[in-house]
Image (cartoon, rainbow, N blue to C red):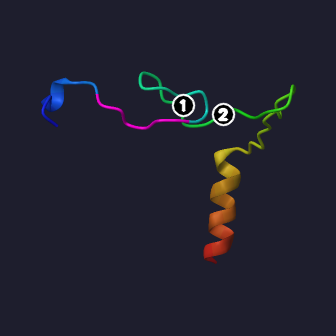
């Protein structure tokens, strides 16, 4: 610690192709095709009717 905070210290970073200047947290793993998202959408009026029915 005689160099203080200005020196380069060996932090012992290894794995996932990491080094002292670049840290990789994880490796991406996915197939060639990504899943496609889908959405179910209803009008706000339908939500209000559902909440009214539940309250009664």
Extent of the magenta region: 9-14
Q: Image quadrant for the C terminus?
A: bottom right
Residue 27: which disc? 2
Within 10 angstroms of label 2, few (less than 14), some, or many (20 or more) residues? few
What's the distance in space between the residues labelled 1 and 2, CA to CA?
7 Å
Within 10 angstroms of label 1, few (less than 14), some, or many (20 or more) residues? few
Identify the residue shown where x is 12% and y is 33%: 2
| Res. 42 image quadrant | top right
Give residue 43's position: percent from left, percent from top. 70, 44
Compared across the picture, whether 22 is left or right of 41 comes to left
| Res. 51 image quadrant | bottom right
Magenta span dominant secondary structure: loop
| Res. 17 image quadrant | top right
Query: Where is 7 relative to 44, above or below?
Result: above
Identify the residue shown where x is 78% and y is 44%: 40
Q: Nearer the viewer, residue 40 or 3?
A: 3
Under circle 2, the secondary element is loop
Q: Is residue 5 magenta?
A: no
Circles 1, 2 touching at the beta carbon (< 8 Å): yes
Q: Nearer the viewer, residue 34 or 29?
A: 29
- Residue that badge 1 annotates: 24
Identify the residue shown where x is 42% and y is 26%: 20
Q: Image quadrant for the N terminus?
A: top left
Identify the residue shown where x is 66% and y is 33%: 27
């Amino acid at each position: 610690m005689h160099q203080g905070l200005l020196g380069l210290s060996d932090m012992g970073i290894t794995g996932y192709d990491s080094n002292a200047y670049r840290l990789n947290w994880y490796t991406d793993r996915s197939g060639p095709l990504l899943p496609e998202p889908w959405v179910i959408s209803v009008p706000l009026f339908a939500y209000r009717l559902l909440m009214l029915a539940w309250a009664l």
